[in-house]
Image (spheres, rainbow, N blue to C red):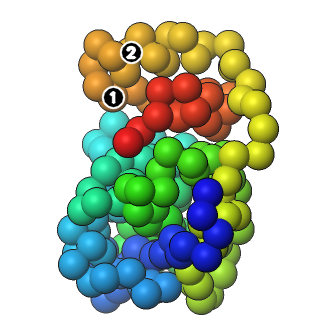
Amino acid sequence: MTGGSLIHAARFGNRGGAHDVLLNSGAPRALLDGIKWYTDRPGTRWPTDSGRTHAGYSSHGHYIVQCTEPDHRADRGGMVTTTALLIPAALVPEADLGMAFDTLDELAGRDALRPVDAGALSYAGACRHEPGAGALLDTLAAKHVAVWLGPGHREALVCLWRHLGVA
């Protein structure tokens, strides 16, 4: 991946009782406004005790990889905090989703965000074929959405990303 290219990060969460942008490393406001509602609670079937969840989707010429978790400090129930990496579409084919997850985990606890050098998200090695990854692929192909709670989801998603691509 091209070193020197920047991938912006943003955090969304509770601002005055509403879901809004909390931190931004310099991404355009139009992009942040365009994805804000995708960074809120990831659907009505999301168990509130499920902890941290990851999601990815295309929007505004970027692929967004995000980590959402319940915000237990919010002044009202049901609020979440989401940290997102905003990967420009041109950089997606060389991006390692596993490295993106690691970067999100690192950024989640920070009080300030900075852009990430694209070189830090380059492929690090071969993926591992997690048991159940084939069923995940079948479900995605048939229903266009899949949920995997529990161990192995990270490895399965990294493997699918690597083999199928998201561009």
Q: Which mark is residue 139?
A: 2
**Disc 1 element:** loop
Above or below residue 84? Residue 47 is above
Residue 116, x across and y down, in percent: 61, 74
Q: Residues within 10 Å of mark 2 (few under 14, many from 20)?
A: some
**What label does residue 18 carry, if any?**
none
Q: Quadrant of the N terminus?
A: bottom right
- Residue at image coords 57%, 48%: 94
Under mark 1, the amino acid is Val
Q: Which residue is mark 1?
A: 145
Residue 64 appearing in the image? no
Residue at horizontal 55 percent and vertical 26 percent from the top: 163
Q: Residues within 10 Å of mark 1 (few under 14, many from 20)?
A: few
Nearer to the camera, 139 or 160: 160
Q: Are marks 2 and 1 in contact (CB under 8 Å)?
A: yes
User: Is residue 119 among the parts visible in the rendering?
Assistant: yes
Give the quadrant of residue 112: bottom right
Residue depicted at 56% across the width and 80% down the height: 115
User: Which callout, 2 or 1, points at the residue further toward the start of the chain?
Assistant: 2
> Quadrant location of the C terminus?
top left
Residue sitting nearer the eye, 157 or 74: 157
Q: 44 or 102: nearer the eye?
A: 102
- In x, y percent, where is residue 80? 43, 65
Q: Amino acid at mark 2?
A: Thr
